[in-house]
Image (tube, coloured by chain):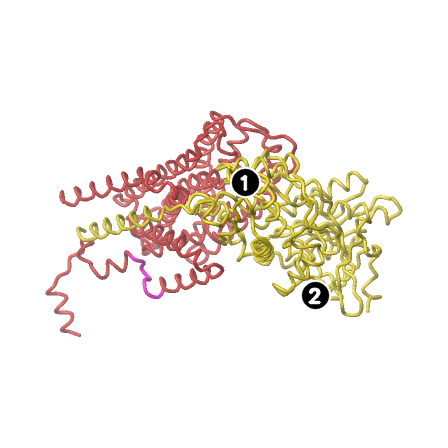
Amino acid sequence: MNAIKQKDLILYSGLIILGLAAPFLFSAFKVQLTYLCVLIVLAMTWNLQGGEMGYNSFGNILFYGLGMYLTASVQVGMFFPLAEWTESGGEKTFVHTTAQYFQGISVGLLVAAIVPTLVAGAIGYAILGLRGHYFAICTLGLGIAAGEIAGGIEIIGAGQGFTTPPFPAEIVDPEARGQFFYFLSFLVLVLAFVFVKYIYGSRFRLILNAIRDNEDKAEAMGIQTMKYKIVGWMCSAFFCGLAGGIMGGLIGYIDSTDVAFDGREMGVFMVLMAILGGKGTLWGPVIGATLFHFFKEGLWTFILGWQYVALGVLIVVIVVYFPEGLMGWLREKYPDRFGEVIDEKDRKAQVEIK
Amino acid sequence: MNKLVKLFITSVSAITLALASFTSSFAKVEGEYIVLGSAISLTGKYSSNGVHTQNGYNMAVERINSMGGVEVQGKKYKFEIIYYDDESNPKRAAQLAERLIKQDGVHYMLGPYSSGLTKAIAPVTEKYKIPMVEANGASRSLFTKGYKYLFAVLSPANQYLEVAIDLAVEKNGGKPVRIAQAFEQDAFSQDVRLGILDAAKRTGSEIIIDDKLPKELNDMAATLAKVKATKPDVLVVSGHTKGALTAIRQISEMKVDVPMLAMTHCDAAKLSKQHGKNSEFALCASQWHKNLSYKDNFFGGGKKYAKDFTKEFGYDPPYQSAESSAALLVFKDAFERANSFDRDAVRDALKDTDMQTFYGNIKFGPGGQNIAKPMILFQVRCKGDDCENRVVAPTKWASDKFYHPIPKWSERS
């Protein structure tokens, strides 16, 4: 047991060092790496519902988009009139000072973590009674509806979109912006990972698994499934909101349906990444997101115009050959490496019976 | 676990090495090439206009290169463009702009298609002080952000259809009109809407229908049903290519009678070809038309440009292609005047641009927008089954008189 822990320690400290050094090692790839961190966070938190709880949610994009709009709105609204900022053709230009920018984004991210969590609680109370496909379809509707509603609210720019505050001009170093957002997203990634790992070792995960495997039995055993489902969703919403807030600042422009409530891309990607890596595992979503991002960034541009066909093929390949994801596939091939003991006698006996 | 960990560490270090060696730098200028970068919508909802834009860029690159290229400090250089597909998505566009600048080492950018994507890219180019000449981002809010490295060869979006309202008022004997309008929910169309609101206020006109259309635009029957019931004097529709196509398709299907129909993107949608007679009398705002009398040394005039373009790509050039070609002429001119590849020198040269191209005069205002070129309006007119876009305003270039009001469907053959 101790040996494994030591190995884990080496692995984790190695990864953290790599993470901290990455923006300096691959300076040109900072923004890609920031995307990677955010993608991993989204996949990992989606896995809490889709993988552990068995509730395929397409609605996590709602919290992501909400976080994005909230961070930007708070960041602007704390210092300037928000309506004038988003008004198109407005004659005034507002400029954040360095201090204002960072104060704004800190408070903004805080709000972006808390409000979506509360919203998840409220919505979860209303719709987590639905199961299976019904829940999936319902959450799919949530993201789409949110996009359309946001596209109609004038104060956040409506269809015009919302330009988030530019990085303070007083910081002359052009690398600073990339580094700032990278470390921010890396921090959120580490927090999310530690949190999910903690959940994996807790009774909470067993309850989520029980809900996935047989909700009625879990209920019958005295577990208040509704309560746990809501709490589980709130946990995801917390990190999705943070991820959204960071992305808003990084992209610099929020569009209601294409950037914020981007169910067609981000909303699908987070599901795809978790399934690619293997849902219901700790490392699956991390590996899935990493592979997916490399696949996307590496191949996308070489097959201009055909990338979505390639993505379609990828989805088919995953579903047909790796239905349990990469981790699931590895686990089936090398069960002993996952700590699963195989009774050789028993296995041989079974073969003989056949 | 042991082997897994090993495998993991091996793959991480392999990727590390691969990436580290990848962090290459194409220079801004490689050998005899000046490398420009552009994210273009080759897929997604803007793909048809994205291709118009790309064709415009390519046409100009070929023409400039074949005519001697760009001369800087006595040496001849050629243009080369690195393209990525932004999938009509602002998030992707911003990411690709970063990639072009940081990974491909591009020092000069050409704009994407649409205001929304330009809005997403501008903060990135601004941060890295990369001059960007864009030809397809018309939203006014682009020019009020104090951007210093953004230059647009086109007129702002709010000017697109303002004139149409003035025209309607004029035809109404100077009395205010009743306007019905429907706009796609995107940066460009919403800015066109603001222009109409201004014009309505100025002329005392009343807006009786003000609808928003979804981004994946293929149905506006609800708006048209209201138009049928309320009988406005003018119907204004804007929603890029799909908006124009949907409007004409459903207006002709539902036989909606309205005295005046004002739109955008008629030429990009090839309306007169695709819908023939059904599109007749539609009034369209355009940045450019081949009949305008502007001239330059590379493309000659508009008519010659149109002829060459048709020969190369097989269709009449919409204004999106023309303005994109003009963007390269602007870059060439700026490089030669700067006589240097220093980004700030090029930027200063761009700021002082004052030239005529086949597409129109180009001179940049303090916000980066082109202030030297008016918008034009054309109307689709048919002879038999052969339909054409005829310029009706401003009077300087008008080849035809504006036909008003549109005859009722029951009277149209």
The type of residue carrying mark 2 is: Lys
Q: Nearer the viewer, residue B131 or A28?
A: B131
Q: Which chain is yellow?
A: B
Q: Is residue B70 above or below residue B250?
A: above
* Left or right of residue B113: residue A205: left
Give percent across and percent down for residue B141. 62, 39
Asked whether the residues under the numbered discs 2 and 1 touch, taking CB atoms below 8 Å apart as contact, a structural biologist would say no
The residue carrying mark 2 is: B273
Which residues, given as a range, are shown in magenta? Answer: A320-326
Q: Colour of chain A?
A: red
The crowd level at tag 1 (other Cα within 10 Å; few <14, some 14-19, many 20+) is many
- The residue drawn where x is 28% and y is 58% is A328
Q: Position of residue A204 (x, y in %)?
A: 30, 44
Residue A153 in view of the camera: yes
Per the image, label 1 sits on a secondary structure element best described as: loop
Which chain is mark 2 on?
B
User: Which residue is identified by label 1?
Assistant: B131
Q: Residue B412, position in %: x, y?
A: 82, 66
Residue most toward the right? Answer: B173
The one nearer the camera, A137 or A245, is A245
Q: Which of the two marks, 2 or 1, is nearer to us in this view?
A: 1
